[in-house]
Image (cartoon, rainbow, N blue to C red):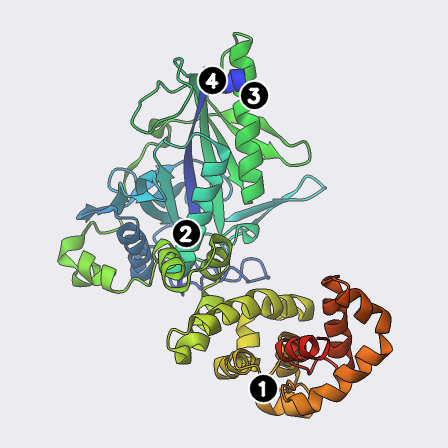
Amino acid sequence: MSSNSSDKYLPTIGLEIHAELKTASKMFCSCKNDPDEKKPNMNICPICLGHPGTLPVLNIEAIRHVLKMGVATNGKLADFTEWDRKNYFYPDIPKGYQISQYKYPLVSDGELIGVAIERIHLEEDTAQSTHDTHQKSLINFNRSGVPLMELVTKPVIHDADSAVKFAKELQLLLRYLGASEANMEKGEMRVEANISVAQNGGQTSIRSDLHFPLGTKTEVKNLNSFKIVEKAINYEVERQIKLLENNEKVVQETRGWDDSKSETYSQRSKESSHDYRYFPDPDIPKLKLSEIPEFAREKLAGKLPELPWIKRNRLKKDFSMTDKEVAVFVESPILSKYFESIIQPFNGDSKRIKLAVNYLLSDYLGLLKKENLSQESASEHIKSESFAELIGMNAAGEISSRGAKDIIALLLKEKGVSPKKLAEKHGLIQKSDASDLMPTIEKIITDNQKVVSEYKAGKVSSLQFLIGQIMKATKGAGNPEVIRKLLIEKLR
């Protein structure tokens, strides 16, 4: 978008994000909720297939997940709620309607990273349709009836980058709460973007306290990666601006994303709520949540884990981590827990804590990637006590930085052996005794007289070359600080 266009037009974006919830069974029946089931139509029953005469029964765990989301986002929890029938015909809806929530969502208002939330409600997922090259469509009902959370933001986002940041933070929150794995590549989290462009009214900056008229919105559905969310929003904003620039109208419609062409395409005219003929489902009891003790806000709040934004602030404040370091630990609760277990015996020693951060984020994670190991399995191979011992040895000068890296790799291979024994076994104990190092130092000086002369003539970098040669000769076992000190004294 050119700077002139960005001054003239204001994009406004609202997100609708669906997330399949992590529960043992489906939303209204006892069928297994298993997103990894490979065989089609295995986890099904008359209820999720919509057979006449069947009665749905509420999944209490799914309701709890959504209410905890409400507490975490500082939303308003409903006292009264009910379920509605959203009527439309499509092959993946066997009943001819989807059970959802319309007028009385479980959660309203709230915010996440500064983005206002309109509502969070609960519904059932549809079956999964696949279309083959022979123009045949197949329906897999394993997903039909899986509890599905839908979160709708207010139209307060104004660029694709902010939309992606919100979606990523929501994914992280769902994982922290144990509500959903929210893997987009598996379809466990799906993003839809409502996008409109309007005249900016001469404003050159966007402020949240100003209210601009909204343009005609289009909805881009089923965006299945963060990269695609960004590309689709940017494309749609550009498309609408071009229409307005040419004095053409933007049509309110539902659009899809064609990844091969990197563009949106028209699917159908956009429905309004009255098109679905919502009405309360007569088979599901209405709930007064204040009468259910386990849904009390205080009780739900007491079961929340440390939330991502609270952890960010704590890691930064307590351990002086950079934003980049904090991001890695916050995005991986397994690594974060492992790190905090490692540093527990350090009693706040900042030097050892910093070493732990460095070795974990560079050497440890790099090794796991190389060996194709998960963080979970690796933490079983290298116990936190062993990693703490390794850090302690390095901080005390018993092993070099190179030695520490080597021992991390050895700990993965020789499970249960202590870092101390591995260092002794593989000759990685750092030599700091002058009597051990001096013969090697004297030999390197004798073998490199030209470099010695250059150093004495004022070429400081020559000293580093000599230290490197001594380290090489000691196979990395020499203490570089002690070597430096002894070398300088010898060359005086």
As measured in the structure, the alpha-carbon distance from the residue carrying label 2 to the one carrying label 3 is: 44 Å
- The quarter of the rendered structure image containing the N terminus is top right
Q: Tell me which numbered mark, 1 or 2, is placed earlier along the sequence.
A: 2
Which residue carries the number 1 mark? 419
What amino acid is labelled 2 in the image? His
Tell me the SS state at disc 2.
loop
What amino acid is labelled 3 in the image? Arg
- Closest to the camera, between mark 1 and mark 3, is 1
Q: Is residue 236 above or below residue 93?
A: above
Q: Is residue 50 left or right of residue 1?
A: left
As measured in the structure, the alpha-carbon distance from the residue carrying label 1 to the one carrying label 3 is: 60 Å
Q: Is residue 77 above or below residue 296?
A: above
- Closest to the camera, between mark 2 and mark 3, is 3
Q: Tell me which numbered mark, 4 or 1, is placed earlier along the sequence.
A: 4
- Closest to the camera, between mark 1 and mark 2, is 1
Contact? badges 2 and 4 (CB < 8 Å): no
- Find residue 89 and report its horizontal and vertical position in percent: 45, 36
Which residue carries the number 3 mark? 239
Q: Tell me which numbered mark, 3 or 4, is placed earlier along the sequence.
A: 4
Quarter assignment of residue 397: bottom right
Q: Residue at x 66, y 88 (%)?
A: 434
What amino acid is labelled 4 in the image? Asp
**Furthest residue in direction top, as rendered:** 247
Marker disc for residue 7: 4
